Image (tube, grey):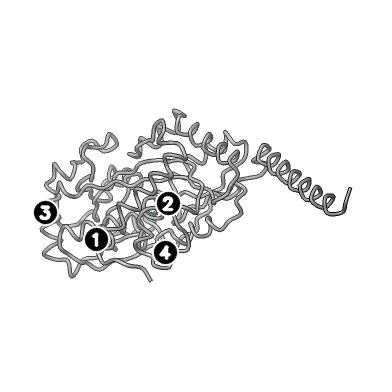
């Protein structure tokens, strides 16, 4: 055999061995714990949902799913880290409407593209938005809230979890509808923001329901409305924004699991299967439903659906947020 042909065959054999090793690794996956990055502080809705589904995914995968909170820049710090992690299935992320829908419009220097830099695993939960205030806020319903905020905007503080987060985009929409610009206090997640709302250090915020149900039931904060067409079974006495007189304020968020781009197909399939099993498990479903979460069903749980959904969300949010004038540095 001539030396050139021998060299070519050698390269081909090495490539085939590499593919076989990769396939064997994917088949054995996971052989150690999987890190799920939550791009906000502990105790917020993203963290709560990640811990609930992650716990059941651990059982299916036979390895622990460890939550790592990497907060900052409205969730984009943690997602940037996740996007740049090794594409081996051992680092995945809980992204959401902000990190994968709103961020491109608000961060001119965003270091990931939500539509191309990830392997979508599946939607984890839908999360209706509530308008809430500290418990002694001087308004007893949404109409009074709107009147009071319009008259006193200059002396009020509203909380959110950083530019581009769900709480930021949804309060931006509320401000636009009310025609106000109260001072904003940015937190590393709405877990810590909620603590300050309970202690009365900030006046109001918009947040995902899963973070709020227990505090609303305990009366430690006031909830004025849920921004969905129908009431939530988790808080059946809370009116919708339509019932309460602000029918144009309609918004819901979502959370979803992503892996870095080029994670092997077999591993993506195992992760999607583990998420699907978590969302089919009665105990997991009850925990999410009790907190007001909306559970994705059927095709909504697939990576293919999530990939298309993210494209639609980026297209939906970009004009709204550009028009709002909000921007991050
Ligand atoms: C958000 O506002 O984007 C989230 O609610 C933040 C969080 O999960 O803490």
**273, 9: nearer the viewer:** 9
For mark 2, give the secondary structure.
loop
Taking the image as shown, residue 85 lies to the left or right of residue 25, namely: left
Q: In which quarter of the image is ligand 1?
A: bottom left
Give how far across and how far down residue 144 sits, in percent.
11, 54
For marks 4 and 1, the one nearer the N-term is: 4
Image quadrant assignment for residue 72 = bottom left
Give how far across and how far down residue 264 sits, in percent.
60, 44
For mark 4, give the secondary structure.
helix
Category of crowding for the residue at label 4, using alpha-carbon neighbours closer than 10 angstroms: few (below 14), some (14–19), many (at least 20): many
Category of crowding for the residue at label 1, using alpha-carbon neighbours closer than 10 angstroms: few (below 14), some (14–19), many (at least 20): many
The CB of the residue at mark 1 lies under 8 Å from ligand 1: no
The CB of the residue at mark 3 lies under 8 Å from ligand 1: no
For marks 3 and 2, the one nearer the N-term is: 2
For mark 3, give the secondary structure.
helix
Category of crowding for the residue at label 3, using alpha-carbon neighbours closer than 10 angstroms: few (below 14), some (14–19), many (at least 20): few
Q: Mark 2 points at which residue?
A: 43
Taking the image as shown, residue 159 lies to the left or right of residue 180, namely: right
Q: Name the residue under label 1.
A: 203
Image quadrant assignment for residue 99 = bottom left
Dots 4 and 1: beta carbons under 8 Å?
no
Q: Mark 3 points at which residue?
A: 144
For marks 2 and 1, the one nearer the N-term is: 2
For mark 1, give the secondary structure.
loop
For marks 1 and 3, the one nearer the N-term is: 3
Give how far across and how far down residue 120 sits, in percent.
48, 45
Task: Give the CA separation, mark 4 to mark 3.
Answer: 33 Å
Q: Mark 4 points at which residue?
A: 73
């Amino acid at each position: 055999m001539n030396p050139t042909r021998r060299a070519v065959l050698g390269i081909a054999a090495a490539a085939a061995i590499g593919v076989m090793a990769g396939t064997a690794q994917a088949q054995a996956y996971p052989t150690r714990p999987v890190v799920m990055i939550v791009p906000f502080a502990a105790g917020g809705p993203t963290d709560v949902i990640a811990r609930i589904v992650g716990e059941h995914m651990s059982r299916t995968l036979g390895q622990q799913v460890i939550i790592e909170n990497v907060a900052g820049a409205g969730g984009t710090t943690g997602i940037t880290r996740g996007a740049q992690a090794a594409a081996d299935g051992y680092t995945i992320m809980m992204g959401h409407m902000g990190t994968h829908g709103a961020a491109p419009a608000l961060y001119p220097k965003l270091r990931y593209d939500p539509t191309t830099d990830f392997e979508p695993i599946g939607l984890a939960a839908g999360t209706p938005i509530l308008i809430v205030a500290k418990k002694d806020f001087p308004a007893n319903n949404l109409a009074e809230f709107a009147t009071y905020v319009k008259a006193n905007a200059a002396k009020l503080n509203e909380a959110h979890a950083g530019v581009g987060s769900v709480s930021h985009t949804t309060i931006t929409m509320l401000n636009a509808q009310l025609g106000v610009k109260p001072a904003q206090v940015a937190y590393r997640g709405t877990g810590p923001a909620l603590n300050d709302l309970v202690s009365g250090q900030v006046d109001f915020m918009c947040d995902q329901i899963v973070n709020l149900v227990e505090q609303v039931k305990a009366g430690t904060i006031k909830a004025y409305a849920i921004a969905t067409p129908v009431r939530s079974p988790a808080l059946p006495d809370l009116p919708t924004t339509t019932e309460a007189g602000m029918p144009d304020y309609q918004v819901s968020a979502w959370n979803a699991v992503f892996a870095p781009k080029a994670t092997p197909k077999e591993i993506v399939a195992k992760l999607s299967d583990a998420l699907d099993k978590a969302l089919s498990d009665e105990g997991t479903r009850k925990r999410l439903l009790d907190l007001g979460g909306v559970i994705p069903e059927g095709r909504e749980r697939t990576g293919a659906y999530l990939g298309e959904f993210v494209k639609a969300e980026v297209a939906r949010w970009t004009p709204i947020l550009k028009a709002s004038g909000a921007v991050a540095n």
